[in-house]
Amino acid sequence: MNLNENETNYSASNYRTPDGAPTDIVIFTITSQEKETGKKALPNRELQVLLIRRKVWPYEGQWALPGGFTRETETVEDCAIRELKEEAGVERVHMEFLKVYSKPGRDPRGWMISHAFCALVNERYLRDRRASDDAEDVQLFPLSEALEMELAFDHHDIIRDAYRRIQQQMVTEPIAKEFLPEEFTIGELYQIIQTVVPAFEEKNFIRKVTSTQSRKGLIEEVRHADGSLKQSNQYSQRAAQLYRFTGFVPELSIYS
Amino acid sequence: MNLNENETNYSASNYRTPDGAPTDIVIFTITSQEKETGKKALPNRELQVLLIRRKVWPYEGQWALPGGFTRETETVEDCAIRELKEEAGVERVHMEFLKVYSKPGRDPRGWMISHAFCALVNERYLRDRRASDDAEDVQLFPLSEALEMELAFDHHDIIRDAYRRIQQQMVTEPIAKEFLPEEFTIGELYQIIQTVVPAFEEKNFIRKVTSTQSRKGLIEEVRHADGSLKQSNQYSQRAAQLYRFTGFVPELSIYS
DNA sequence: GGAATAGTGTCTTTTAGACAATATCAC
DNA sequence: GTGATATTGTCTAAAAGACACTATTCC
């Protein structure tokens, strides 16, 4: 106990206190599925979310977000990182706080204020894990499907909120990076954005992202050691220039 | 207790649980101080934060953010709204979740995961309250001053995070609205933005915010009942056009 | 050569950026 | 008229938007 029992002005035992501090993690990934046609083409991409089938009360047998209880010796962020590793087997991925869920009665186990996080995981980090898991208990679901399932707790709301968040972030922050390889073509970048934000459409996309002064520096061309431009013909007949994110992020303003 | 004692798979009493669920509220306002010169001019503006002097252990006598403990029957948002009313006497103001603070040891009273909120309050709502409060215990401090004070708990960090947040929001969301009267001049809007983001500078500001196609609709001219343009000479010799926010918010994108 | 994807040329309209010029009104 | 602030004119450079065109490579 951290409580200082000598103090009379405050004692936690006088008040009703929470019954735990759970975290829930929305793990997004974008899967790639090669097209049937034997021709070179970008693969089909789909936004997926990882769910776990509960083994214990409450909501036993139902699908739920991975998560767990925060310990007294860690922050909620530490907890989310720990759970992400334990339940999805991935480390050092992009994760950020999403929202706090504290509606009374949201958890039959008692008074539980949950801290939801949003993790973006490149499919290459999940692929190994998926094979080793019992596919019955840990599974990726297409987001659209997950949103129609009956999930444990208020996890449907959490996933909906997380989806809105990444749709917003996809066009205002360079999170596309998390779903792409280090080096990618403009076509791949465009496709990833559209996978998360289907309405996204930019004519002359390549020009805006490479030539426009104010955006200049968001991505840069990749070159070989000898200085020549590095290209890839993995997905197309004509080879396409490879780019990488630079770390620079243009500042946005409604007053421009 | 909400706990279902019949269930054997889970019992909160088996685990260490938090000693409370506090909220802390960073209440920002922008004060107006008429200039000494008898001439018409925009007032001096200053970003201020409301602090409360603690009466009880811990940090007795030190300045701290207003806040309190969440009840089992409310959400953390409800709690923040309740505390905002109790401690600052204001209702229905702009407030949003800032961040969760859960570093072990951050509160000498025990294991406390705090939910910080950021409230933006127009000075006209605070003015009455300020007079009625014992000025010794509830006080507005210029933000720069607050950041140099020794505050209770980790409230210094919270205020710093809140400041970063509103600096970001001030140029990407129409929060300037919260600090302005319903109808305002371009000069006032510009000044409010600069009060929060001193580095903000836009040449031809009026044109960007009124004529530019993509921003068009963020603010609109105010007209009299007869359709003539409504102007104000409160702060200038030549009367200036009054504007109001429309509710429309331009969408931003790093890929434009 | 045809098909498929990558990338460029080119023209028009809109916006950004810089400042000079004009408008209004208290004094 | 002077001084102070608000607003418009004007010119140049940059960017957006549309779309036809060329480039590369697999078949």
Image (cartoon, coloured by chain):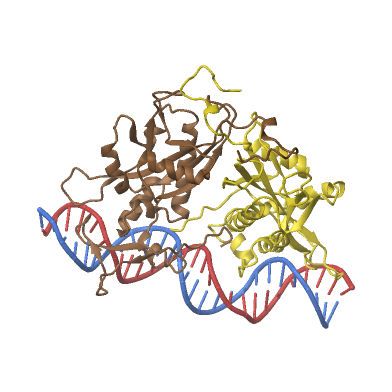
Chain colours: A brown, B yellow, C red, D blue
Q: Quadrant of residue B49?
A: bottom right
Please indicate whether residue A30 sits to the left or right of residue D4 in the image: left
Q: Is residue B49 visible?
A: yes
Look at the image and tell me in which quarter the N terminus of chain B lies.
Answer: top right
Look at the image and tell me in which quarter the C terminus of chain B lies.
Answer: bottom left
Residue B7 in the image, given as x and y percentages of width and height: 49, 19
Please indicate whether residue C3 sits to the left or right of residue A72 in the image: left
Residue A112 in the image, given as x and y percentages of width and height: 56, 32
Residue A89 in the image, given as x and y percentages of width and height: 35, 43
**Residue at image point 63% right, 57% down:** B160
Q: Quadrant of residue A151?
A: top left
Q: Quadrant of residue D6?
A: bottom right
Residue B104 in the image, given as x and y percentages of width and height: 57, 46
Q: Does B182 appear above or below B109?
A: below
Compare residues B121 and A82 and report the one nearer the observer. A82
Q: Is residue B181 visible?
A: no
Compare residues D24 and A49 and report the one nearer the observer. A49
**Residue at image point 70% right, 51% down:** B152
Q: Does A5 appear above or below B72?
A: below
Please indicate whether residue B242 sits to the left or right of residue A24 in the image: right
